[in-house]
Amino acid sequence: MVLTDQDLPSAEVLIDVPFYDADMLGIVWHGHYAKYFEIARCALLERLDYDYLTMKETGYVWPVIELHIRYIAPARFGQRIRVSAALKEYEYRMRIRYEIVDDETGNRLAKGISSQVAVNVESGEMCFGSPRVFLDKLSAFAGAKPGGI
């Protein structure tokens, strides 16, 4: 199965930056960007019908093994941000690209990428390729789209 970028899922979420995510200057603490990425990643996985509970039920978990964030401009308390997550690699790992933009202006605030690998729940061993259940979910997603495989 070979999927193109157009076949791969993506998702967007809107977040109103809450008070408790900001410092005394009203600027979002840098660690919260990973949380915003996670919210978008969950929306992406739900589009595939492969959320974290489904993963575990099918015998695999996908820990994050790498996360890179590039901060461009600060997000602020009360700002509405749009966070997108797009699957970019799937055969050996799950690699997801993120972007955070101001919803009103479209100005980019941050971008990033994460890598996750499949781990067999029963054995605790890392898989050297994506499990069939994940590939089947991707195939079903691509097949459900007009022009999908």
Image: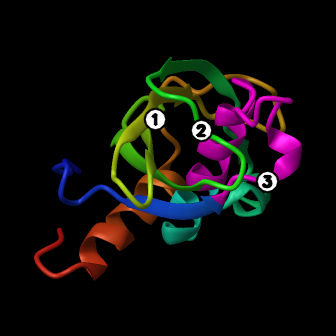
Within-10-Å neighbours for mark 3: few <14, some 14–19, many 20+? some
Q: Is residue 65 above or below residue 73?
A: above
Q: Nearer the viewer, residue 124 or 24?
A: 24
Task: State the extent of the magenta-drawn residues as a range.
Answer: 16-41
Looking at the rendered structure, the kind of residue marked 3 is Pro
Q: Nearer the viewer, residue 138 or 44?
A: 44
Q: Earlier in the sequence, mark 2 or mark 3?
A: 3
Looking at the rendered structure, the kind of residue marked 1 is Leu
Residue 109's disc number? 1
Image location of residue 35, percent across then percent down: 72, 40
Q: Residue at x 69, y 55 (%)?
A: 78
| Label 2: element kind | loop
Looking at the rendered structure, the kind of residue marked 2 is Ala
72 left or right, relative to 15: left
98 left or right, relative to 23: left
Q: Which residue is mark 3?
A: 18
Q: Residue at x 84, y 38 (%)?
A: 122
Q: Is residue 85 above or below residue 26?
A: below
Image location of residue 88, percent across then percent down: 33, 39
Q: Nearer the viewer, residue 60 or 78?
A: 78
Within-10-Å neighbours for mark 2: few <14, some 14–19, many 20+? many
Residue farthest toward the front in the current orientation of the protein:
25
Q: Which residue is mark 2?
A: 75
| Label 1: element kind | strand
Q: Quadrant of residue 72?
A: top left
**Contact, mark 1 vs mark 2 (Cβ under 8 Å):** yes
69 left or right, relative to 138: right
Image location of residue 71, percent across then percent down: 50, 21
**Contact, mark 2 vs mark 3 (Cβ under 8 Å):** no
Image location of residue 133, percent across then percent down: 53, 57
Q: Residue at x 52, y 18 (%)?
A: 68
